[in-house]
Image (cartoon, rainbow, N blue to C red):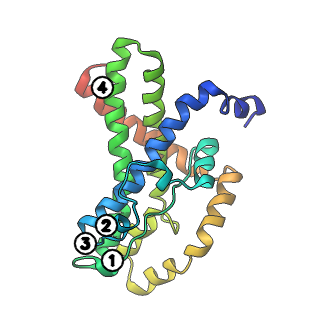
Amino acid sequence: MPLTNLLDRFTVSSLLIRLPALLIALTLHELGHGLAAYKLGDPTAKQQGRLTLNPLKHLDPLGLLALWLAGFGWAKPVPVNPANFRGNRRRGLCLVGLAGPLTNFLLAFLAALLLALLLLLQSGYALRLMQLIVLYNVMLGVFNLLPVPPLDGSRVLQYFLPAKAAFALDRLEPYGPVVLLVLIATRSLNRVLLPLVNTALNMIISIVVLMTGVS
């Protein structure tokens, strides 16, 4: 990344647009996890004050910085106790894991709808903010669906694996963050994720164009 582009991200004008978009994406992602767990019978997130729209309760400074600089990052994981789930625990973990990325994709879709309206109104700040909300939510949703512990995709994959293989994948979780940081720092992750991000963005935009007629 060129130094001039990196410095541009820390200007006051950039902060006023990027930071709200980042906070919305990260906060709603974790809230989605917490609400799903609560609906399945686990009150842990609620008891620890995580069922909130207050971004300070959800932020991981390193994950926020990674999302800002690389486009892929994370928040502080919502505490989940599968022992409290009603029914199948592995199924519950799968549903909780899916809830975060699906929340991001829903937010991206809603922001894209608002973006179509703003294009007609030619609203400057709001237009750029909606663009970033769409982009960051799609990036966060796709990134978290990777089947690498401790990302949400690993919880989904574990549900479909045999018990022994699911246990082996779960034991890799302590090493997952280091692997992800190396992949992000070397930009190796981009080769896998950017085509998926572009596909998801194109799908959302195509649906919005069909619904609104605005392109």
Q: Position of residue 55 (x, y in %)?
A: 47, 48
Q: CA distance from mark 4 to mark 2?
A: 34 Å
> Mark 4 falls on what kind of element?
helix
Picture disc at residue 41: 3
What residue sits right under mark 2 in the picture?
Answer: 37
Q: Earlier in the sequence, mark 1 or mark 3?
A: 3
Closer to the chain start, of discs 2 and 1, is 2
The residue indicated by pointer 1 is: 90
Q: Residue at x 39, y 61 (%)?
A: 49
Mark earlier in primary sequence (4, 2): 2
Badge nearest the viewer, 1 or 4: 1
- The amino acid beneath tag 4 is Val
Is residue 63 shown left or right of residue 6?
Answer: left
Disc 4 or disc 2, which is closer to the eye? 2
Judging depth in this view, the residue of 164 and 92 nearest the camera is 92
Q: Rounded to the nearest whole Å, what is the CA distance between mark 1 and mark 3?
A: 14 Å
Give the mark nearest the N terminus, 1 or 4: 1
**Quick check: can you spot residue 136?**
yes
